Amino acid sequence: MALLAVATAGLLTAATLMATPARAEAAEQIYNGGFDEGTSGWYSYGTTSSGVTDGRYCSVVPAGLANPWDAGVGQNDIPLIAGASYTFSFTAAGDPASTITAAVQLGVDPYTGYLSRSVALTPEDQQLSFTFTAPEDTEQAQVAFQLGGPAADYTFCVDNVSLLGGEPAPPYVPDTGPRVRVNQVGYLPDGPKHATIVTEATEALAWQLVNADGVTVADGTSAPRGVDAASGQNVHTVDFSAHTRKGRGYTLVADGETSHPFDIAPNVYAQLRSDALQFFYIQRSGIAIDGDLVGEEYARDAGHAGVAPNQGDTEVPCQDGVCDYQLDVRGGWYDAGDHGKYVVNGGIATYQLLSTFERTRTAPTARRGALADGTLRVPERDNGVPDILDEARWELEFMMRMQVPAGQPLAGLAHHKIHDASWTGIPLDPAADPQVRELHPPSTAATLNLAATAAQCGRLYPRYDRAFAADCLASARTAYDAAVANPAILADPNDGAGGGAYSDGDVSDEFYWAAVELYLTTGEQRYLDDLTASVHHTDEVFPATGFAWPSTAALGRLDLATVRSGLPDAERQRIRASVTSAADAYLETLRAEAYGLPMPGSRNNYFWGSNSNIINNVIVIATAYDLTGDPAYRAGALEGMDYVFGRNALNQSYVTGWGEHSSQNQHSRMYAHQVDESSPNPPTGSLAGGANANLEDPFAAQLLAGCAPQFCYVDDIESYATNEVAINWNSALSWIASFLADQGRTHRS
Ligand code: 9MR
């Protein structure tokens, strides 16, 4: 289909050029109108099932819906130009014969109609074509096949969807602001202070550090660094670490450019610790979000609490043929911009929250009370339990509910995930989600995520709630035994309708991590034997591109290095040395990168969620500091975060509300302000996924094709592959934020 379209367009171009050289070629505004890329770019809602079959997009539509728009298929964010003529064409069938509405309209309130046609479909394909003139300029038109109304269930199929007209989009050039790139949040007085200049100059440039009164307080010359592989830019670096005086609103001036303003102060990160953690409460499922705690704009009804129109999450059936029981799997956090809940990703996120807390007990520079009760805005504050533990418990209880009950086949394993049967549109309040929710098959990976985190729970909660800690440990043991008995039940990589797959073909690292956590909690020989026998106990577990949800051996290794245990001294030293030598390698990368981050600048290294991988490498450097007190690691951990706060090719802070120019349109059904004014932006402290050279969403694919790795990001709600929020990303941010906040208080001046 795509090939044919291209060939036809080519012929037209030739003809047009010869006849009327002055006229621009009509542009195709629909992405994937031939469904060669599956359902990519298309939304559907209200249908019983939707998907691509034999190259056509087909939906089963339930009978008797009240309005045409109660079920639909379409595509959003189509630009239209006022006064330009468009031809909307497609091939469609309805079986049994049914009447639908084919529309082009504004995709957001007030849904202004540009074209609306009632179309009587038959079981035979019909080719249809309509022309209209766009009455206004918009970036947010949609084509919509409104399918509700017919009295009987029917199957709707469509292909060759085209909207031809307007002008081809001009090439996208991001606004990257001043060419002097700094950490827009700021620098600690006693910390490293580096910046990057984008310039054509090849010789050293003069720079000045200017205070808020316009006075130059330091100056020097830059170091030319040549062309940076991660950005494709010619760059220099500046080191102004020698300036240690506190102040607000500094700027760095070089090459005729003035950087965004930044502070030098011990407390630049003080508030980030709670901002990053606050994200989790606002993501909670199964509880009303209290506006008095987090602001009215985030107040909402409890999502998926067993109240219509929700079909979950209190009595959730399995997918067809998977099980014949129902589970109450209420609670937990929504994973990201979707309403799915995935045990695998819940695992690493919960681990990082618990580790953030545990670090306050093990790290010399940690302020013990920083995460005490009353430090977060959660409903459980002032209950005598540290709020971060209340927050992690919300997910732990959910993960334990995902465990297959005793007496059922595969008892003790955890179901991999629960989510909607089909993808829903944006925005959508969780409480208004009408989709069927389904349990997906148990997996060994999910079970080991449960075992590891429930084991952490078993050692961190006893002093606050002995019974809960005991429940956790029992659940962890049962899960671990079930995983040992079923070591290779892998989640299906193609199970991606209505939710992410989170599949993982190698669970040996999850086995290691779970054995480590169970050993650290119980001290039992059995778990020590298992972890010692694992290849991961002696292998390199810190990849150059960072640990993440599918690669969890590092989580076990970090805890073995930091948490007190009965490991023999020599063994503990070996483990700790593996952390510091990984940190050394990350520092080497950081020094080689002109933007000062611990991620080698190759195209392959900037992938989905890259910001969390980068932060996870910073966490390893920070842990090396916790273990050794060597200031080079402290400096590396501080500099390593400059990238996230704006010292990068796009001059973009990736944390909402932090820095002069920060991400604010992350992909989310709950924080959808970009497409619905009544919906909020993501809360302050939300980390965006970050640069992703694989461009796996249609919006980014179209807009950013050919981008250099650090340019493969756009702060647009449509770009889920570069700009989503996710619990495993904010958990990495939370860990490092707590570390950074602690570093501020060690400053004496
Ligand atoms: O973070 C996940 C990333 O590593 C994968 O490459 C990607 C595609 O499978 O999925 C990401 O996770 C998404 C999940 O599948 C569904 N919820 C949103 C998650 C963040 O984008």
Image: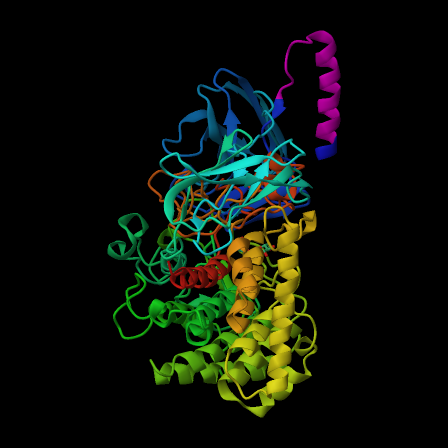
Locate ligand 1 by image quadrant.
bottom right
Asked whether 415 falls inside the magenta stretch, the response is no
Where are the magenta residues, as a range? 4-26
Taking the view exactly as shown, the residue that stands out farthest to the bottom is: 525
Q: Which of 492 and 219 is in front in this view?
A: 219
Give percent across and percent down for residue 333.
Answer: 42, 62
The residue depicted at 66 percent of the width and 51 percent of the height is: 592
The residue depicted at 41 percent of the width and 85 percent of the height is: 470
Q: Say if residue 90 shows up in the picture.
A: yes
Task: Name the quadrant of the N terminus.
Answer: top right
Q: Which of 746 and 520 is in front in this view?
A: 746
Quadrant of res 364: bottom left
Asked whether 11 falls inside the magenta stretch, the response is yes
Quadrant of res 126: top right
Determine whether 5 is above or below 433 in the image: above
Task: Name the quadrant of the C terminus.
Answer: bottom left
